Image (cartoon, rainbow, N blue to C red):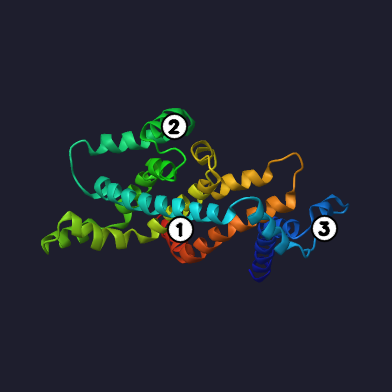
């Protein structure tokens, strides 16, 4: 068992190094001059141009504003999805009303529709509402999604004891107070997982923001990164520097929600 443990640790170390290497090599490229990247063999150690490349990123595009826009959009969408999904999950998992099963099946069925089919009708709606070139056009269509509703429904069905809700009702709590004081605390591990997944998906979304956001001041980070990659001559050091800057907020969010995220995954594993 002792030798097997060593083998396991070596495998884990190898997986860790393979996982970290793309980030490390991106940093190496971002810290080099673009002309140094054509050398054979390519550089494997960080250079001294990281600060200059960061300055060039902010000089080329309004990247600071793009990061703020992405933070606003991702935070608003994440909070909204977690709140509305938990509300709907509570109703589908623990409340009794006519048509509950049919409504849940209908919600789940919408996940089979490719998102590309809805882009043109949604874009026409944004034009009608005069929301194009506004962050509202990115936030509003993503306020709730079927996956979040299904995910929270399954979690609350297993993790929230019905007896706890009945005890609350005996003490005079209505559904509103039960939701805020019982359901939301019980749903915290799943909410962290859903919030993290939603934040990542919204932060990395590219097609829809590219369609509805035209002015540089309204662009999100992913759209701004596409500007860095455009042009006749590819400046990989500039593009990788922007990518690294856009990754920092994701690492911060993971650091803040990491404990809850791991707790939610372990909870699901134990239940499974």
Q: Which residue is label 2 attached to?
A: 123
Q: Position of residue 189 (x, y in %)?
A: 39, 60
Q: Quadrant of the N terminus?
A: bottom right
Mark 3 or mark 1: which comes first in sequence? 3
Q: Position of residue 132 (x, y in %)?
A: 44, 37
Q: Which residue is label 3 attached to?
A: 43
Question: At 53% from the left edge and 42% from the top edge, which residue is drawn?
Answer: 215
Residue nearest the viewer, comparing 147 with 130: 130
Mark 3 or mark 2: which comes first in sequence? 3
Instruction: Give the structural element (helix, strand or loop) at label 1.
Output: helix
Left or right: where 110 falls relative to 101: right
The residue mark sitting in front, 3 or 1, is 3
Question: At 19% from the left edge and 60% from the top edge, which residue is drawn?
Answer: 177
Residue 18 visible in rendering: no
Q: Which residue is label 1 attached to?
A: 265
Q: Is the residue 233 above or below the residue 112 in the image?
A: below
Residue nearest the viewer, comparing 191 with 121: 121
Residue 90 visible in rendering: yes
Q: Which numbered disc covers residue 241?
A: none
Q: Position of residue 247 (x, y in %)?
A: 59, 57
């Amino acid at each position: 068992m002792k030798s097997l443990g060593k083998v396991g640790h070596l495998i884990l170390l190898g997986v860790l190094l393979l996982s970290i290497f793309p980030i490390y090599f991106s940093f190496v490229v971002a810290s080099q001059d673009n002309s140094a990247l054509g050398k054979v063999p390519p550089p494997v150690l960080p250079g001294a141009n990281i600060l200059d490349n960061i300055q060039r990123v902010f000089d080329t595009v309004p990247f600071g504003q793009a990061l703020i826009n992405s933070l606003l959009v991702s935070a608003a969408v994440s909070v909204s999805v977690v709140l509305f999904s938990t509300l709907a999950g509570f109703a589908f998992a623990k409340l009794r009303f006519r048509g509950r099963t049919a409504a849940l099946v209908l919600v789940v069925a919408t996940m089979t529709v490719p998102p590309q089919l809805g882009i043109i009708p949604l874009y026409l709606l944004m034009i009608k509402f005069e929301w194009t070139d506004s962050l509202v056009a990115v936030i509003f269509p993503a306020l709730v999604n079927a996956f979040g509703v299904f995910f929270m429904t399954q979690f609350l069905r297993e993790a929230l004891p019905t007896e706890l809700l009945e005890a609350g009702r005996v003490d005079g709590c209505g559904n509103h107070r039960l939701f805020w004081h019982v359901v939301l605390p019980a749903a915290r591990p799943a909410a962290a997982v859903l919030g993290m997944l939603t934040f990542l998906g919204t932060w990395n979304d590219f097609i829809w923001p590219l369609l509805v956001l035209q002015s540089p001041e309204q662009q999100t980070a992913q759209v701004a990164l596409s500007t860095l990659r455009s042009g006749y001559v590819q400046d990989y050091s500039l593009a990788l520097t922007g990518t690294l800057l856009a990754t920092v907020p994701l690492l911060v969010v993971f650091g803040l929600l990491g404990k809850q995220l791991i707790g939610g995954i372990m909870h699901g594993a134990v239940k499974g």
